Amino acid sequence: MKFHGKNAIVTGGANGIGLAIARNLVMAGASVCIFDLASENPAERASTIGAQGCVADVTDRSSLESAFGLGPIPDVVVINAGTVGIASIANTSAELWNRTLNVNLTGAFNTLQIAAERMRPTRKGAIVLTASTNSFDGEADLIAYNATKAGLLGILHTAANELGPYGIRVNAVCPGLIRTRLTAEAFSNPAPLRDYFRHIALGRGGEPDEVAQAVLFLASDLASYITGTTLVVDGGQLASKFGTWGGAADSFDGQRWTRNS
Ligand SMILES: NC(=O)c1ccc[n+]([C@@H]2O[C@H](COP(=O)([O-])OP(=O)(O)OC[C@H]3O[C@@H](n4cnc5c(N)ncnc54)[C@H](O)[C@@H]3O)[C@@H](O)[C@H]2O)c1
């Protein structure tokens, strides 16, 4: 996967999955700019991986437009900025609902619309959305998050349909549980992890680099006939309906299941 001579933008690129995507793009030869909130010091974070950084709030159109305007027309745009808040339906406040929709859904739409406007005249390019396995399931206590991640599939399909005639491909990755600050609490609790990972065929959580590799594939020329689709990066979680692990030959070491037979 080669990105020499290509310009890439990664929103939410100062941390976690976005930072791993930006780093892998840089290693593959791309000129990368990460967009993130001022509080995350995107320029400073970018300098550690050989990228550029730009302050941009995806919920604020004018901030996003100025950030896009500062750089060259992108060949690759990764729409990754996201947030999550845990609450039951009863306890989901209007503030949590609106904040989650604003960042994950309106922010993705804002980024897509501006990116498409800039890329269309070049008649080429690739856009990758970070959706989730929660685009497909109904994990409890995440109603706002789940609604946004399911909504991203509507954005994905419509954008692939409208931008295909301009040579712009649009795809999504759907990560399962990946070790980032968003999931740090889950990863630090071995007891619930044991049960959670029982339902993951590979028996463990994922790392940001494992999502980044899938994003690079979808953004690369190797995926030249792929648009409008999702690539699930979940260790087999969605495939493992009744669970995989927990038999007499299986053991859990706090982070992963192993089969001893
Ligand atoms: N970690 C997981 O298990 C997991 C699983 C599936 C999907 N995802 C998705 O992956 C993406 C990245 O999540 P992560 O786990 O790396 O979390 P993270 O918190 O480490 O990174 C999210 C980044 O988005 C940025 N961001 C938030 N609001 C923003 C805004 N308004 N404008 C610009 N940037 C903003 C944050 O500052 C942060 O740098 C999210 O869309 C998340 O929903 C994560």
Image: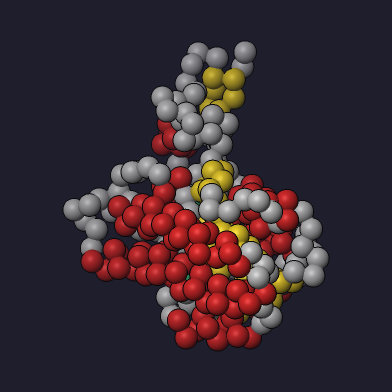
**x and y percent of residue 211 in the render?**
61, 50
Q: Is residue 124 shown above or below 143? A: below
Q: Is residue 182 shown above or below 257? A: below
Q: Quadrant of the N terminus?
A: bottom right
Asked whether residue 80 is in view, the answer is: no
| Viewer-closest of 123 and 151 | 123
Q: Quadrant of the C terminus?
A: top right
| Residue 158 position by quadrant | bottom left
| Viewer-closest of 142 and 163 | 163
Number of callouts: 0
Q: Residue at x 59, y 20 (%)?
A: 259
**x and y percent of residue 121 in the render?**
63, 77
Residue sitting at the far left = 90
Asked whether residue 223 is in view, the answer is: yes
Q: Is residue 253 shown above or below 64? A: above
**x and y percent of residue 249 in the render?**
55, 14
Q: Is residue 53 left or right of residue 130?
A: right
**x and y percent of residue 13 in the render?**
59, 67
Q: Is residue 97 left or right of residue 199?
A: left
Q: How is the image coloured?
A: secondary structure
| Residue 189 position by quadrant | top left
Q: Is residue 222 shown above or below 127? A: above
Q: Residue at x 30, y 49 (%)?
A: 141
Q: Residue at x 41, y 49 (%)?
A: 135
